[in-house]
Image (cartoon, grey):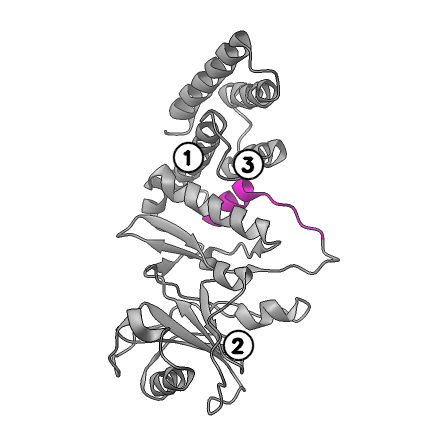
Amino acid sequence: MINTLYKINFQPQQYNFRQQQRPVLPNQPCRDTVSFTSVNLLKKESGEITKIVKDVIDNTEKIGFGSEGEVFKIPDTNYCVKIIKGESTRFFGDWKMNVSEQDKINNIVARAENDAVIMNYLEGQPLKWNKPDEIYDLPKSAYKNLLKQMQRANDECMKFDNSPSNVIYNPKEKTLTAIDFYEPSPDVEFEYTPLSTAFSVLHNHSASPEHMKNNRNLAGKLLDVVLDELSSGKKPEFEIDRYDVFKLFGQLRMSQNLNEAPQMRYLREAFSDIFRLKDLPKTEENTRIFNGKVKYSKAIIKQELGQ
């Protein structure tokens, strides 16, 4: 079971769904006060779960808090519990295990009548603006899985709150996990742009040569993931939009504070050809040209973006 940790940061104009589920970031480790197995926790009766949760709230240090909520790790389990400030902790009512798909995307596994929730607990650390250099050397699978999370949320009409603190980095497992998705107001238009969103969250804002190199490396990994998906011969695991790809190119150029190098122009042109060829009939000639453009693009990425 993966573990999750959250930050609460409510925006009053959003739906009540968002107000109930905003995550809380980790603050300090807790001390164990009760003991039971995570396998059996959600199979217990509502009253027994409530008793365990109350014991945790009364005797366990918080692992996260925000302006409107507090989170406590449930010892000896892969779960944590979040309670809303101002809500009575004496009444929880029945715990509902049949949560919505939107709840599942936010790692919520059970919900009480007073809006307390039990969530999966993610090991790791939330990213900050000054990010550890090792996140730029992660395997491509780490970035791909982050993009797949955004795809899953988009399928449920949910948007990622793209703040670095809403991405958990697990150095042991070498993973990146987004933790805060919300349902936008229907009168607010938003674009599904996973690539440029991932870059904006993960890239380093420093103008130092080392951090600028890290940003190039990050863009190269994301673009390489796109090429792998487009050339896999099967349906991509996340939606790839031409606009999003070229928006990423623009972000990379801005992060470098330099005029675009000729090789990067060639790379953009190659991606234009790849998208065009992708929509053409799969003739032998078109496939040969397509594969050649992919190989050429990967060579530029390796040379110019550190792959």
**Mark 3 burial class by Cα count in 10 Å: few <14, some 14-19, many 20+:** many
Query: Was residue 258 drawn as part of the magenta stretch in this picture?
Result: no
Q: What stretch is highlighted in magenta?
A: 189-205
Can you identify the residue that label 3 sits on? 248
Residue 303 x %, y %: 39, 22
Say left or right for 68 vs 126.
right
Q: What residue type is labelled 3?
A: Leu
The quadrant where residue 167 appears:
bottom left
Q: Which mark is residue 289?
A: none
Residue bearing the label numbered 2: 67
Residue at 29% over, 69% down? 39
Distance Cα–Cα, label 2 vs label 1? 36 Å
243 on left or right of 120? right
Q: Which amino acid does label 1 sit on?
A: Lys
Q: Compute the Cα span from label 2 to label 3.
A: 34 Å
Q: Which of marks 3 and 1 is nearer the N terminus?
A: 1
Q: Quadrant location of the C terminus?
A: top left
Residue lying at the far right of the rendered structure? 187
Is label 2 in contact with label 3 (beta carbons under 8 Å)? no
Magenta segment includes 201: yes
Residue at the image position 26 percent from the left and 82 percent from the top: 34
Q: In which quarter of the image is the N terminus?
A: bottom left
Q: Which residue does the numbered mark 1 point to in the structure image?
A: 221
Residue appearing at x 30%, y 73% in the figure: 40
* 102 or 294: nearer the viewer: 102
For numbered disc 3, what is the local secondary structure?
Answer: helix
Tell me if I can see residue 130 in this picture.
Answer: no
Q: Give neighbour class at mark 2: few <14, some 14-19, many 20+ (Cα, 10 Å).
A: few
Q: In this view, does 229 lie above or below 42?
A: above
Examine the image and state in which quarter residue 300 appears. Answer: top left
